[in-house]
Image: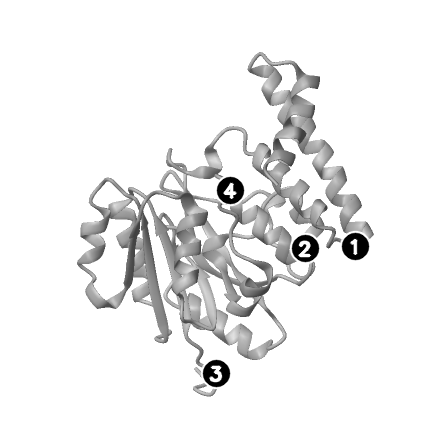
Amino acid sequence: MNQIFSPLVSVIIPTYNRGALVCEALDSVLGQTYGSLDVIVVDDGSTDDSFARLEAYGNRIHLIHQENKGVSGARNAGIRIASGDYIAFLDSDDLWEKDKINAQVGFFRNNPHALICQSQEIWIRNGKRVNPMNKHKKLTGMIFEPSLHLCLVSPSAVMIKRALLDEIGLFDEALLACEDYDLWLRISSRYPIYTTDEKHVIKKGGHEDQLSRAPGLDRYRIRSLLKILKQGTLNPAQAKAARDVLIEKCRIYAQGCKKRGKDQEALYYESIRDAQGCL
């Protein structure tokens, strides 16, 4: 590593009732080949043995214990005390390969104009390696429009210049899910999001407590789309694309509600009114 460019990187791990998993995640951070790390773990009101396990790491980490506020509140608590010039996130059920941070610091050294980048991932579902579908392919550059349809950025894979979060804002704590979708839209509407070729993240899935498996997630995506449209910061092409996706997601959400015995047209407008009320 070029010692002329060795910035402090703050790593933020939010966790809730994942005592064993969070220690695996944390060990993958402490085993990084890059040494200039500020490691912050936010225990978001766990009722299992998470806090006791984490206390055993002593002064190798900054440990926060707070009342349960959800993943946005946990990540934001970490960001607020972070000292690093760069911020990296790791979900407590994911792992990093040992060169993840070193490679991303190298990317920023070679691309000083970049504000955010992410690495590729290895996907593990129920203990078995799987290949992501084509729609999940990570793109690079100005990815706002394709990102409207589904989240194309993984929190565990990104590194962000702290100054960008100071400009764009933090995670929206009013969103119980899809909070990352919301943040990546705000960023990608203004700046390119770069993706490197290396697979430095092991993304594990299939367990029951994953937020991405919760029903009705389009409700939160609808709120995000309405919010960014209301802000008036999109250019005309971006605004049209966002409105088109908003209409489609309202339709899909309404269809899902209809399957649960509610009137489709009523739920179509209810989804919009609900979102507007949360702005």
Q: Residue at x 43, y 86 (%)?
A: 3
Residue 88 appears in the rendering: yes
**Residue named by callout 2:** 143
174 vs 144: above or below: above
**Residue named by callout 4:** 174
**Residue named by callout 1:** 235
Dot placed on the residue nearer the N-terminal end, 2 or 4: 2
Dot placed on the residue nearer the N-terminal end, 1 or 4: 4
Q: Quadrant of residue 268?
A: top right
Report the number of numbered marks: 4
Which mark is in front, 3 or 4? 4
**Residue named by callout 3:** 5
**Cα–Cα gap, marks 2 and 4:** 25 Å
Residue 96 appears in the rendering: no
Q: Residue at x 46, y 65 (%)?
A: 87
Residue type pointed to by label 4: Ala
Q: Residues within 10 Å of mark 1 (few under 14, many from 20)?
A: few
Horizontally, residue 155 falls left or right of residue 54, namely right
